[in-house]
Amino acid sequence: MIRRPVTSALIAAASLAAASAAHAEETRPAWALVLHGGAGVIERGDMDEATESAYRSALGDALALGASMLEAGAPAMDVVEAMIQALEDDPLFNAGRGAVFTSDGRIEHDASVMRASDLQAGAVAGVRGVRHPISLARAVMEDSPHVMLQGAGAESFADDQGLERIEESYFFTERRWQAMVRQVAALGLPVPPRPDGAPEPEPVREGSRQQMEREHRFGTGGVVALDRSGEMVAGTSTGGTTAKRWGRVGDSPVIGAGTYAGGDCGVSATGTGEYFIRLSVAARVCARIELAGEDGQTAADTVIQDELLAMGGDGGVVMLHDGAPLWSFNTSGMYRAAQVAGGEPMVAIFEDEG
């Protein structure tokens, strides 16, 4: 007599779950896209009109590229790679060409990518002279038996894969160099010699430029894409932190910390990497959805606004959950953009937008 109502309850629960899944499938957009270009102290009063316009244009261009690819039926992996390549080629962002310098005057890149359907992932850390670190991370996932490669070994693998190598002077930007010089001096360390092949020194405009150095103290570039087949991919690329020492690696190449995709959840993070690693932020957000039954926004806010802040960490995430673009950040701004099939593009910078 006890078994029958329990069985009925189980059948009812299963039916409800199936109906809920079917409803989610019906309401999910054909494709969806969200990206970030870093988070930090980004305030209206500190950013001039030209700087704000440049960032909005760059975010909009990357979003338009991804949206056009997804609309045409491109797989999410190709979309994430292409969009992050665009961010890596833009000196506005702390990834690829716009990456910050280490304390010894070098540029070292980190990147990662993860696919939701089979939890396959690839990552690289401390890479030099590879034009597109995100492409190397993808190659690690698809063409090696490993998940993460670092330093010279990762660069050798890039050569084996025929990926584009480039002189390190290509990545040089004056404002990143000057930011490193100021930080190194503040730390009481010797200023490294200017890199070979770097252009002659030029004035760096203060005001908005100083603002950009503050906001990019922990900047990255990241994308999460859902394609027409239902596949979801998350990817992240960064130059790390200004004047980093001793081969420091942050959260961006750490699967589960800076990047995660699994089930109906995909996350790319940006922030103080040491805290994101300790808290496994990206995977933690998705775990709260799966294990605690929270909706995506609640899960992201709990991790970023409560747990991360309680540890003293700052930054944020962008994510897709059931095809809905979401974000949460505990800083005064985050460069972000999103679009779903049939919807209008959204580009935002400041806390009070979107």
Image (spheres, rainbow, N blue to C red):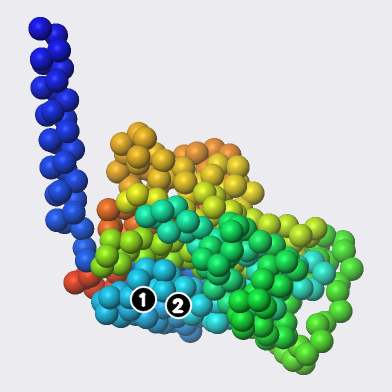
Which label belongs to residue 66? 1
Which label belongs to residue 82? 2
Which label belongs to residue 179? none
Disc 1 marks a residue whose amino acid type is Gly
In the orientation shown, which residue stands out farthest toward the bottom? 200
Image mark count: 2
Where residue 95 sits in the image (x, y, percent)?
59, 72
Front position in the image: 82 or 343: 82
Disc 1 residue crowd, few under 14, some 14–19, many 20+, Cα 10 Å: many
Where residue 116 sits in the image (x, y, percent)?
39, 55
Instruction: Please name the residue shown 48% across and 49% down the image.
Output: 282
127 on left or right of 312: right
Disc 2 residue crowd, few under 14, some 14–19, many 20+, Cα 10 Å: many
Front position in the image: 23 or 164: 164
Instruction: Please name the residue shown 79% across and 66% down the image.
Output: 103
Q: Is tag 2's residue or tag 1's residue first in the polypeptide sequence?
A: 1
Where the N terminus falls, by quadrant? top left
Where the C terminus falls, by quadrant? bottom left
Does the CB distance between marks 2 and 1 fall below 8 Å? yes
Front position in the image: 262 or 280: 262
Disc 2 marks a residue whose amino acid type is Ala
Distance from disc 2 to disc 1, alpha carbons, whole Å, reads 7 Å
Check the image and report above or below for 41 versus 104.
above
Residue 211 visible, this angle: no
Check the image and report above or below for 109 versus 252.
below
Where residue 181 sits in the image (x, y, percent)?
78, 72
Residue 319 visible, this angle: yes
SS state under label 2:
helix
218 on left or right of 224: right
In the orientation shown, which residue stands out farthest toward the right? 190
**Can you tell which quarter of the image residue 266 is in?**
bottom left
